[in-house]
Amino acid sequence: MEKESSISGNILDLKIIGRLFVFAEPYIKQFYILVFLTIAMALITPARPILIQYAIDNEVAVGDYQGLVVMIIWLVILLVIQAVVQYAHTFLSGWLGQMIIKDIRIKLFNHIQRLKLKFFDKTPIGRLVTRNISDIETLSDVFSQGIAAMIGDILQLIVILGVMFYTDWKLTLVSLSMFPLLIFATYVFKEKVKVSFNNVRTAVANLNSFVQEHITGMNIVQIFNAENREFDKFKKINAEHRKANVKSVLYYATYFPVAEVIQACGIGLVVWWGARGVIGEELTLGVLIAFIMYIQMFFRPIRMIADRFNTLQMGIVSSNRILNLLDSTEHIPNEGTLKKDTIRGDVSFNNVWFAYNDEDWVLKDINFDVKQGEALALVGATGAGKSSVINLLNRFYDIEKGDILIDGINIKEYEITNLRKHISVVLQDVFLFSDSIYNNITLRNPDIDRQRVIEAAELVGARTFIERLPGGFDYNVMERGSTLSVGQRQLISFVRALVYDPKIIVLDEATSSVDTETEELIQKAIEKLMKGRTSIVIAHRLSTIQNANKILVLDKGQIVESGNHDELLKKDGFYTQLYQMQYKEVITA
């Protein structure tokens, strides 16, 4: 498994921030309200020390009890307003973040669905899961705890600083004497946590990839007694995850006590200098108490800014990963506009060359024609290129050279969903979702009713075993169809192909994993379905394709022989060798 490398985000990457705010456009009114609330909080916060200073110097100092009561009432009103504004700000920022990441997650998942299969061949599934879940959750903090909150903290600092200088500039300078030390500590903390958080995200992605991959392939791990070896690998990756998180915790555990000490020293200096001023009657007691509150208010946003900075930093890192995935051009271009309600089903491959990797040719100069209602069979050794043919026909991959035509029209001219609507595929490796048999057959297509599913199951011969299951067609097959046999899963996938009533049927090793009785059921269904439909069959069992109109023998990506069963046997070539090998296996068995 390829590990994900660490990347760093730049908080001043305006390009990324600008692209993120595109997702906020549908909620621009709410965003402006959030900005207003942020400004309101910055203005309200220093009002409390001002009122307390006034109360002490103008009411308490002269013994004006009634005036003090009035000031207390104003303080209560101010606190209520501050609480309401803070509640609205917290709720709206959280709501905005969740709405935006909902839209991003939908866009990302929709984008992933349209990527080429080649992309999934080289990208760990666990990494894609991390992008769609963990990275997007981190991104939500950019809107709920990052940008808006950081702007609010900065505004609050500016307002408090302005009030402090206006009240007493000398005491303000004394108050700020510890400020450079706090800035230095904050900078060191920011840089350390930036690296730490980046390592945490990388470790999470690697851990997700490893766990997903090994749980999916658990049968292989157990078959080959690899539990201990794989467990050792897991412990190593898990240790890297723990190490990254512990470092992050260590930096937090160090920074905040240091910041508290620096703040306490700042307050101590204010009290020392202010007390001298009060004693010398150069300063009022109300101003001194107000400055103690100011310095607490001033230092708190700085500490929070460091934390929010790293939240935003990790949001930028996650955003970069998400946007890179969204920018991926590894998808089949859907430039075709042709839509047809029905097709004849003529298929032609003209001088087709294809490679999964640059010019490492899997198919070389492939030419064949299949007319409506005919059956074409593809045979050959493993790796000969048989499955690549059907992948190209469905445009799961695009060819490098040549043309593929359906009804004489290049498949690139068809709208891609319309193209695939006319082609049904039964794969050797059947995938069933954790859902009912009915939903696995219809894939929740509202155009397919239950009666149609039942008729298709009857045609295949699957209805009997399905109706014996608890709940029948509503039986939950669990993840990957684990509660069904290989043959039963194969039959369900065959029903799934039939309900779409295709003009072209592709069977990729469709009977290679079933018993003889089940194979006979499928063969009977195939005979009925092939009438009026084009069929392309890939099979190891040559007995299943003897009635095909044409058989192509592939070897190393090239067509080495073609003809029907009898013609190929007379040639005494590749096909004859394959046939004799299978005949010997049957006799031996």
Image (tube, rainbow, N blue to C red):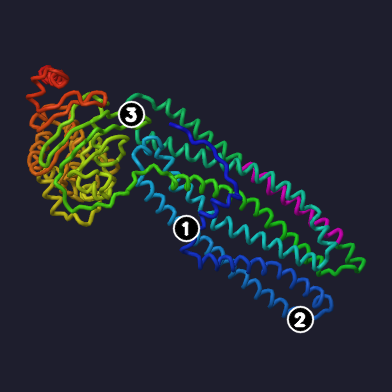
Prevalent SS, magenta region: helix
Q: Is residue 589 in sight in this rendering? A: no
Please tell me whether residue 420 is drawn above or below residue 55 in the rendered image.
above
Please tell me whether residue 91 is drawn above or below residue 265 in the rendered image.
below
Q: Amino acid at mark 3?
A: Ile
> Element under label 2?
helix
**Picture residue at 25% right of the left edge, 53% below the top:** 444
Position of the N terminus, as image quadrant, is: top left
**Picture residue at 50% right of the left edge, 30% below the top:** 236
Q: Nearer the viewer, residue 509 or 178?
A: 509
Left or right position of 276 against 555: right
- The location of residue 533, given as percent across then percent down, is 12, 43
What residue is pinned by disc 1? 100
| Mark positioned earlier in the residue sequence (3 or 1) | 1
**Picture residue at 67% right of the left edge, 68% below the top:** 43
What residue is pinned by disc 2? 67
Number of the front mark, 3 or 1 = 1
Q: Amino acid at mark 1?
A: Ile
Q: Nearer the viewer, residue 411 or 118?
A: 411
Q: Amino acid at mark 2?
A: Gly
Extent of the magenta region: 249-273
Where residue 150 sits, quadrant-wise, is bottom right
Look at the image and say whether residue 68 sits in the magenta stretch.
no
- The location of residue 231, given as percent across then percent down, is 44, 29
Q: Would you call the spot at circle 1 few (<14 residues within 10 Å), some (14-19), or many (20 or more)?
A: many
Left or right position of 312 against 497: right
- The location of residue 411, given as percent across then percent down, is 25, 44
The disc at residue 348 is: none
| Mark positioned earlier in the residue sequence (3 or 2) | 2
Left or right position of 452 against 111: left
The disc at residue 220 is: 3
